[in-house]
Amino acid sequence: MPERIPPEAIISIRGLTVEFRVARGILTAVDNVDLDVYRGEVLGLAGESGCGKSVLAHAILKLVDPNGYIKSGKILFRGKTDVLSLPQDELRRFRWKNAAVVFQGAQNALNPVMRTSEHFLDTFLSHDKETGKEEIFSKSSNLIEEMRLDSSRVLRMFPHEMSGGMKQRTISALSLLLDPEFLILDEPTSSLDVLTQKYILKLLRGIHEETGLTMLFITHDLATLAEIAERIAIMYLGNMVEIGHVDEVFYEPKHPYTQVLLKALPSIKGDIEDIRPLPGPVPDPINPPSGCRFHPRCPHAMPLCQETTPKLTRVEGRWLVACHLYGGEAK
Amino acid sequence: MSKAPLLELNSVSKLFEVGGGLFRKPSYIKAVENVSLQVYEGEAFSLVGESGCGKSTLGRIMLGLAEPTYGEVLYRGKSIWRMNRAEFAEFRRSAQIIHQDPYDALNPMRTIYGSLAPAIRRHRIARNSRECRKVASELLELVGLSPPEDFLGRYPSRLSGGQMQRVAIARAICVEPSFILADEAVSMLDASLRINIVDLLLSLKDKFSMACLFITHDFGIGRYFTRTGRAGVMYLGNVVEVASIEEILNQPIHPYTEVLISVTPVPDPKLAKSSPLPPLRSLEIPSLINPPPGCKFHTRCPYAEEMCAEKVPELVEVKPDHFVACHTK
């Protein structure tokens, strides 16, 4: 079957499966997933912990923990280059220059005995040895200022002298140092208090609007995605279940899992009586249910759901749902 | 409210010494400063604040786990630090805590039964081990871990975060407390699981008519827990506003409460994208060692007046049952 890659896709994930060897057997963290990230968008990737969203995002850079491996699939960059088959030196260039990542708990990613300036210098020189120090510093200052930090102060600071919010903003500035076209943010605001979180979301949104930087924003917190994302993708137990525009998915969720997930969110707005807990227990990820993995908890489950895994199917425009209710054919 | 409070704090402060040495004078952090608060029998109360505002220290003081530097803690009208041993032991039985991290709260080397049994035996709820096992089974059933035989012999490492938090709840309620403190009890759990645990807490609270103080940084879950009950907001060691949660959310009076509500994420794309940044004068939270004089919020407050830098505002009733500590209101 010829692959359909939309012309404006910067990253196209096709049939990606990532497995982990664990004490009790093989855990399929990402199971045959397709996903496109379009140039210039903010795509939100959400799901409960353990659904495979972080594993998926890291696999885009061919980063997998030592006990895991990419079993099959392709990661196409601009529809052509398969990241997974790049030789080591090209892969190195791809990371940071084409695609950069801000990891979860990134505040701890800074070396405690290095000043901010050394972090910027180190990162730049390891990818580009030609540019002079002056130029690197002026670029670093600009990026730090863009994060509304005092660059002359911050560049001279050690990590322990900075607050969590400052470190997070410094790391975000660092990730933009080599002008990546694509930025992956893995739970970048989860460990921050709500005020700093709001501030950083506004900053990232501003940078996106100014430069058109493509972002993949991963979080378990759907409310954060409501604020920053244009499109969102929902994962459940290693499967992609729904992808659509953020308004479509929030206001008229199609997949039963998305529906119950949104109903389980407490909020300061809306009717408390409408909030419902998720039905049923979380299945064992090593022995996931047959067919559609959500069927044991699904209020609309049919006999078919136990037998065949529904495929992501277009319901309208770019709105995709993997559910037999919407005619999702077998995978 | 006319009822007598179950637990009462009178102008409580807690100071921590930092950075002292042999030849150096220590500085002090006022983790909690001059807080007065009442918790009534059977009440659901939410205490909301950002990390570092002193809400956990305040919780520890309420449970008698930390002695306040100044002020008094009264349980059913009696000062807990003037109780005799037997009375204090009885108070400690009646006031229980559920921690944020169930992984830390349960001993990894003990089975679930091994974690529950000492509490059951110690407070003489069961006389022999057969009775004890029966009580433990009933408890697990009560917190939704069934069949209990499946769980009694398991170690914490074989439980999920939500299941572990259920065990922690079972252990807290096994001594039939009249007051439960839930300190960020659901913030480590997935957003989708939080409701389940809060629902469990609420049903147990009603069943055993316990009072429950829910400490959280998230107004959304605080509202879900409290429903129509009361809530308090803390900032840098002070309680700045106390009222019913609905009134706080719909008509906040303290400028800090206003800010905190405005930055609380809402799962609604149109609302979330259109909400502006609050008009704060500074993003950085002042240091607790050298807090600003007067109202601690004045350096960031958009409405600050001259007086705010000079005088500490008292918590006063500005509307019936609505208390605020702010000069500008």
Image: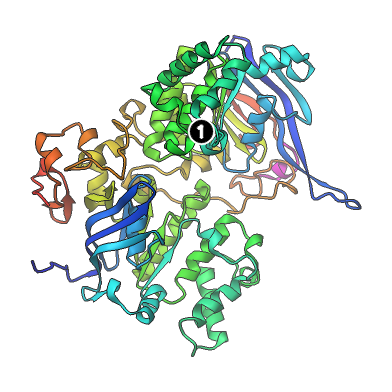
State yes or no: residue B310 in magenta.
yes
Query: Image check: B310 left or right of A277?
Result: right
Q: Is residue B234 above or below residue B293?
A: above
Would you identify the image quadrant in which residue A273 lies?
top left
Chain letter of the residue beneath label 1 in the structure image: B
Q: Identify the residue at horizontal 45%, vertical 60% (top origin).
A: A103
Q: Is residue B131 above or below residue A222?
A: above
Can you give x and y, in whole percent of width and height, for residue A250 in the image? 27, 44
Q: Secondary structure at mark 1?
A: loop
Q: Which residues are magenta?
A: B305-312
**Image quadrant where one finds the N terminus of chain A:** bottom left
Can you give x and y, in whole percent of width and height, for residue A320 in the image? 17, 52
Q: Nearer the viewer, residue A190 or A2?
A: A2
Q: Nearer the viewer, residue B119 or B45?
A: B119
Query: Image check: A210 left or right of B302?
Result: left
State yes or no: residue B137 in magenta.
no
Can you give x and y, in whole percent of width and height, for residue A302 in the image? 11, 34
Q: Is residue A327 above or below residue B183?
A: below
Q: Which residue is mark 1?
A: B185
Q: Identify the residue at horizontal 50%, vertical 56% (top origin).
A: A105
Can you give x and y, in whole percent of width and height, for residue A304 in the image? 9, 38
What amino acid is found at the position of numbered circle 1 in the picture? Ala
Query: Image check: A157 left or right of A35?
Result: right
